[in-house]
Amino acid sequence: MTAPDAGGPFTGLRHQLTAAATAFADSPDTLTGILAGMVDDVDRALAVPLEIFPVCHHSPASALAMVRRLREKQPRVIYLELCEDLQPLLGELGNCRLPVAVQAFASELAGHPSEWGPLSVVAPITEASAEYQAIVYAFQTPGVELVLVDRSTDHVFQWLPRTPEAQPDGALQMGAGGGRPGDDAALHGDAVGVEIGDLRPGFAELEAYLLHHGKVRHWSEWWDQYVEQPLADADHDTYRQVMVLIGSLFRRLRPARSERLDRDEDRERYMWTRMREHLATSGIDPSHCLYICGAFHAASQVEQFGLASDAPGYEISPRTGTRWRYGLIPSSHSAIEAQFGLAPGSVSIAAATWTKALKRSGLTPYRLDGQRGTRTRGRGGRDTAGPATGPTDRLSGLLAAPPALNGIDEAELRGWCVDIVRLARRNGYLASTADAIAVYETSILLAGLRNRARPTPYDFADAAVTCIEKDVVPGRRDVRRLCEILLGGDRVGRVGYEALPPLARDVLERLRPLGLDLEKRTVQRALLDLHADSRLAPCSDLLWMLRYLLPHDAVRPIMGERRLGQRSIQESWDVALGRNQRALIELGYEGVTVEQVLEQRLRRAIRGPQATAAGALAAIEDAIRLLDSPRLVDELGARAVELLATERTVDDAPNVLRRIRRLLAHHRATATALPAWCEAFVAAGYTHYCTLLPTAFVDEQAGVRQVGAMLGFLFSMENLALSIGCDRTQLELAVAQAHPEAPAKVALHWAARHQLGLLPLTELRDCCAELLANPLVVPIFPQYLSGFVQALDPVPGLASFVVELMSTAFAQLPDPILLPWLPTLITTLREHGPELVPLLIREAAHTFPGALPALDSWVPPWATATPAPAPPVVPAGPVVGLLTDNPDSVDAIAALLGCSDPWQRHDQPGRSAVAALLARYPDTAAAVVDLLSVDRATAQ
Amino acid sequence: MSAGSGRTTGAAGADGDATPRMQRPPAEMRYADELARLRAEDTAERPPGWALSLQAARRFILGDERAGIRRKFVGDPSLIDRALVTLATSRGLMLVGEPGTAKSLLSELLAAAVSGDSTLTIQGGAATTEDQIKYSWNYALLVAEGPSRRSLVPAPLLRGMAEGGVVRFEEITRCPLEVQDCLLSPLSDRVLALPELTGDDAMVFAQEGFNVIATANTRDRGVNDMSSALKRRFNFETVFPIADFDTELTLVVTEAGELLRRSGVTAEPRRDVLEVLVPAFRELRVGQTSRGDAMEPLSAVMSTAEAVSVAHAVGLRGWFLRGEPGTAADLVSCLAGTAAKDNPDDLARLRRYLEQQASRHAGGQWKELHTARHLLPG
């Protein structure tokens, strides 16, 4: 480490500060240590032969100082504090409209906790930033090398604490992932943000103190007033010394040994090690190099700091096996503000300040070829750096004088006042010229009250809100938002075609027949008449795939749908790909074409640990709908069979049944034979559900709907299953083994037995009648009824009986039991309506009278149908004949067995008890015969 | 100013003589010494007709430790900046916010700082008439002499215009719309016509320093909504409740202590009791406990001002009934009247809070509060 020169240029300042500390502080030693240490830091940073250029992020003053310095010094090597693995992307900046963010993205993690995934790191870049100016200079000046020296994106996550509760968002600046998709503030998604020159007080009290005494409301305003504006036109030495001083101040006034500080120090070791390595290998003179880093790092205390240090290099750990992918994504001022906790509108104000400062100073900024706006190059010639002179103290003067403010000039303020009133009127406010005057007057008075010579944009915004905002916001935007728009507005970047990944370019090319400008950020309507223009069919296919892969507002079908076996001939789409460029670019990290990514996603859906058979069937549907690839469908189908066979629960049975029915119907309608996987799935399902059926009937976890769906599968797929070799005995055994206890499942079980022919309808009716007759069971009768309703799907033949049973229940159940159950019935029918209601309605229509008058005379069919008496069983056959003719043997056997009744011939009615009765009272029979006018002889 | 000097005499009588003492003197009397010091040290430029410069007025309200000026308003300092600047322009200042957010206190402080007199006050209500705002007549003189300056009885608006002072209009939205609109001409043209008089007396022109500070509750929004014409003559500023717990607690401790001293209670309020009172108020106000559990908020206003008044009542109860500072049990008794008022639903919510939530907080006072829950009336 370089020791500060005790007798250097800052001796006077050091003495002054020490004297001040002694005079004012309660514990002068501490304050002296801090103040003198700050001056030492400045001294030490300036003494390093490799020029350290401290910056602050999104600071126009830093950018201006950088432009001036680059023009003056013309360094040959620039070391930049940015993740070293992002370097290859920087060349693509020329194809973009700033602000954009350089992104590293990883979805397949190795060496990082899987719950952190997907990992995403963004480094937003705006034009009004020192790093951008340095990057452009390096790219446009021949012979200049740009070296990124900060830790790689992989190390960003490697260095995070691995405790179970640690999350990336706990230690890093996460994006506005919670914002509404489509908001400009949510452009970075939930990525982790890295930036050059993050400079902020280390603890809240210090920031609150600075804000209070600075008479400002937020940090951005403080920075703008006390650092940004005084340094806007400062010379290089002043700029550098002040920035290092501020970096040192915030470094020294922060909680000791915080994790953040440890990480920052590791980064500094990393950067100095990388720079030393590069200097050693390239052999370049350090005086021709420039090290651009945050002001915080310029006041570093690590042992590797400087070139004179003999401390060993930092041992850099290897990267993990995580596969990182890189690209550029669009960014915006509001996204940057949200990502890094800056005040709303501050980056826009910085951009406006940058433009104004350029105009005022006459400086020409560096701008990459092809970038929007006037193409400007840095001066081609290489000026030699001026003679190196030792540092002189520029701090004393600056610290002693009040900040010189470059407030807005009068004409500009007048313009703003008029414009804000115009904007406010357009947004529903009843603002007038009088308000413009009031805003002007209030701005000036506010600036005066806050000790500013001229109003700043923040004063103007405050004044506008005070004068125009009333108790109600009439439109979508309030006055503060209107001020932000007026003061520069949010600028949204765009990644140019050339900088897009291949997939995104491919998408844009393939959608070209739509005739839309897909880079626009507006929502555009695309009309596709597939019948009239065959070129649009591939576009439609692609749009449906994008619909599946991208956020839902990226492409949205307005008219037309694509289901199994169904394609619309006309479609209408709302396309907003320009607004969802980030999503499209991130899709590009996954593959080269949309088809490939879709295939991967479908495969991933069925290979994951959470994959289910129903999920696999859904993937198959999507594969057929979107890709029409029999090979993939077969592969997914085979996996679906595996998944089904290994499932231990029947939770998904309804889904499985619904989807396999749909797929079977599709295949039967479109192909001559069912695919092999379908047959295998049905066979496996038949066996699987037969096996699980007895358990499911008694398992409390398995619902009635699930058991109903299992029975539905078994009964409705029975024909197919038996034709491919399944055994019906399995099903009969399964039903026989089931002994449900829950009423609804008992009803289902009865229905299953009825379907198998084991329980005739009359017996079923008797069972239900018994239930209704039993006062102890009546309260739970609705549960039986629920079971029968669920049985409608597996046993549709029971529909008339269910209607009968429901009618009986409505007629007989007391209201306290019936009424609480009715909502359950209604919700069940509503939820499963498509399957159950049509059946019930059809059957009810057959059963009940169609018109109201017929109701009075209507008799339920089940009430009139008297059961036909069973025909007497008359034993017949040679054995019976033989026994009848020779009853003695039988009587003897009966006697041996203890039965005293003699053998009776069944064909001899006279032997029966009835015949005996009639014989005893013949008059009755005769009277009956008379009445019936039957011939007496015949009667006898 | 005559009115001010008259009251000063009254306040001075409190030192020992038998003159009745004011319960709550106006701000310019309570802080007379601070105002005098600020006026003496004030070298900055003053807006025309102002008693103090903008900077000094700011220091008067927000405090200045070095000069020994107490902070009187706890809130966003930039709100004070904007309010003062508004008063320096030709716009009136409208303070809106939830009840109990110290709007009236702020308007009083602003009036005292700007014109040295905060008593030009109109209290808005459904029965407020133009006479009470502008002027009325001494009918005996009117009958005897006819309309003249002598028979005219000036109301606060006329006095404020004639003397160049700040007029406070409390609860302006509770006044009928046509009564509110009598401010239009004084605010825009800075003139008030007296049609009963003739000649020079027929017009009163506002003197430098005149302006209007109005206050309105957001809960009363829509009762008598202001006309657009009047709205555009006011700059609106919203006063928000105190967000920071420590700040609110400190404020309650200070204000309750001050009120108790004025009530003759020599014992300081117990901080541990107030440390129960303030969180209880916050929880009942927002409907969420400090642990994040949802609960039913009270429909009554549970502002910091109400917390101060409960703390005051607790102190009085403890001191005058038992001769000691108030306890958590006193708090239960005083809460019913403040928080529940006549609303049985609120009383039930308060009872549920004391039953279910108070016991979950740690600390002796919370325990005592829970134990004393049966003291809740009803």
Image (cartoon, rainbow, N blue to C red):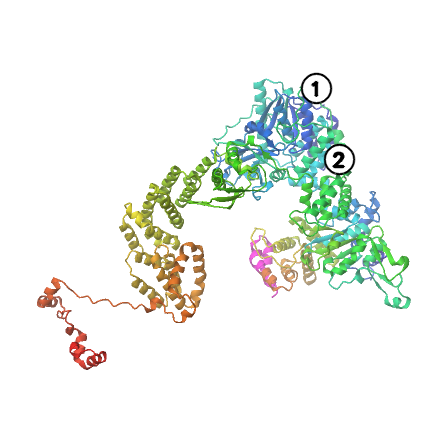
Q: Are marks 1 and 2 in contact (CB under 8 Å)?
A: no
Q: Is residue B136 magenta?
A: no
Q: Earlier in the sequence, mark 1 or mark 2?
A: 1
Question: As rendered, which of A209 and A498 lies closer to the eye?
Answer: A498
Residue kind at label 2, given as amino acid type: Leu
Mark 2 belongs to chain: A
Q: Quadrant of the N terminus of chain A?
A: top right
* Magenta residues, dominant SS class: helix
Occupied quadrant, residue A353: top right
- Against A837, residue A457 (above or below) is above
Please indicate whether residue A214 sits to the left or right of residue B282 in the image: right
Residue kind at label 1, given as amino acid type: Ala
Mark 1 Cα-neighbour bin, 10 Å: few <14, some 14–19, many ≥20: few
Q: At 77% from the left edge and 48% from the top edge, which residue is drawn? A: A434
Residue annotated with mark 1: A388
Label 1: which secondary element: loop
Residues behind callouts 1 and 2 on a single chain: yes
Residue annotated with mark 2: A405
Please indicate whether residue A541 sits to the left or right of residue A213 in the image: left
- Residue A910 percent across, percent down from the top left: 15, 74
Q: Quadrant of the C terminus of chain A?
A: bottom left
Please indicate whether residue A170 sits to the left or right of residue A673 in the image: right
- Against A48, residue A171 (above or below) is below
Q: Is residue B361 magenta?
A: yes
Report the span colored magenta.
B352-378
Question: As rendered, which of A867 and A905 lies closer to the eye?
Answer: A867
